[in-house]
Amino acid sequence: MENNIQDERDTHDIQTYRVRSYECGPDGKVRFSHICNYLQETASNHAEKLGFSKKNFEHLNLTWVMTRMHVRLQSYPEWSDDITVLTFPHGMRKLKAYRDFILTHSNGSPIGIATSEWMVIDVKTRHARRLPDVVETCSNTVRKPVWTDRPFSRLTFERNDSEIIEKQFPVQHSHIDLNGHVNNVRYLEWMMECAPEADTAHRVSDMEVVYRAEAIYGDTVTAQCAQHTDGSRAHQVLTADGRELITARTEWTKL
C-alpha cells in the first residue's frame, strides 16, 4: 500500500474485519463466502460515505445491484485473524460502475484482490437506470485498477449431462437481502455445494461470477457444476423454469 492512503480518504476506504469462529470451516479458516461478505459490506459503507449508497438513492427509487465480481486469493485467514479491506471506485462505462478491493493481513501480507461491476436499477420496474452524477464525481483517478488485464471474461456453462453435478435449494426468508431478492453471496454458497473440491483440502483461489437475474422468496433454484476442459469448474444457478440466475467459474487450490 502507498504511504498516501490517509490523504486520499475521499476516494478510498479501509475497513478491518476479525474472523469469527462461526465464519470458519472445519479447518479453522474463513469461508470464501464470508470474504465476499466483507467485500460487499466495505463497498456499501464506502458508498454511504461518498453519498451514493442505497440509503442516498431511496428518494429516487433507485438501488444498487452487483452484476459481476472477480476474486483472486492467495491465502485464507484463520479464526481471530484480522482482514483489512481497502476499496475504491475506479471508473464508469455507460450504465456500469466499477469498484476494486485489496485484501491484506493485519501485518500487511497479501491475501488477495477483487473487482466488481455494479448497476443502478429502478426499485419498482427492476430496469437499469442512468448512474446519478454523484457517482462519476467520486471516481478514483489516483490508484490503478487491481487487474492489469481484462478482469471479466465471457462466462459459459459447458453442458455435458453425464458430468453435471446438481442440487436444489428452496429460497427461504433468511436468503433475502435489503433489495428484496436473494443475497449475492447466497448464490456462491449454493453453487459451491456442487463442487467436488468443497469437501477436500482445496479452496477457491479464483472465482468469477456474472449475475443475470434475481431470485425471490418461494423460488426453488437448481445449482449445477461441471468441469471445463482447462480443469476449472463451471457453475450456474437456475430457477425451476430454466431461467439462468448466475454463471460462474472457479479454480481450486490447496491454500
Image (cartoon, grey):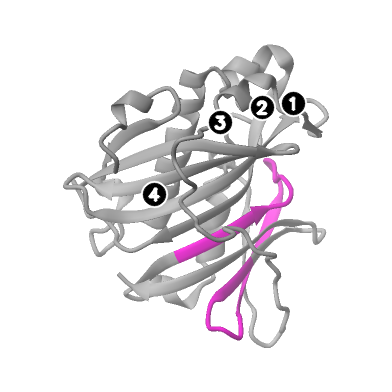
Secondary element at tag 3: loop
Mark 1 and mark 2: Cα distance apart in space: 6 Å
Q: Which mark is residue 138?
A: none
Q: Nearer the viewer, mark 1 or mark 3?
A: 3
Q: Which mark is residue 123?
A: 1
First along the sequence among labels 4 and 3: 4
Q: Is residue 71 visible?
A: yes
- Work out whether residue 63 or residue 240 is closer to the camera in this orientation and state it: 63
CB under 8 Å between discs 1 and 2? yes
Residue at image position (31%, 59%) is 25
Asked which quadrant contains residue 91, the reply is top right
What residue is disc 4 on? Answer: 35
Secondary element at tag 4: helix
Residue at image position (29%, 40%) is 2
First along the sequence among labels 1 and 2: 2
Q: 203 left or right of 122?
A: left
First along the sequence among labels 4 and 1: 4
Mark 4 and mark 1: Cα distance apart in space: 27 Å
Compared with residue 64, is residue 21 higher up or lower down, i.e. above or below?
Answer: below
Which stretch did the figure color magenta?
Answer: 206-235
Give the image location of residue 103, x and y in percent: 34, 48
Q: 73 left or right of 88?
A: left
Label 2 neighbourhood size at 10 Å, few (<14), some (14-19), many (20+)?
many
Mark 2 and mark 3: Cα distance apart in space: 18 Å
Mark 4 and mark 2: Cα distance apart in space: 23 Å
Label 3 neighbourhood size at 10 Å, few (<14), some (14-19), many (20+)?
some
What residue is disc 3 on? Answer: 139
Give the image location of residue 14, x and y in percent: 34, 33
Give the image location of residue 84, x and y in percent: 29, 41
Q: Given the current orientation, which residue lies at the most extreme top position? A: 59
Secondary element at tag 2: strand
Q: Which mark is residue 63?
A: 2
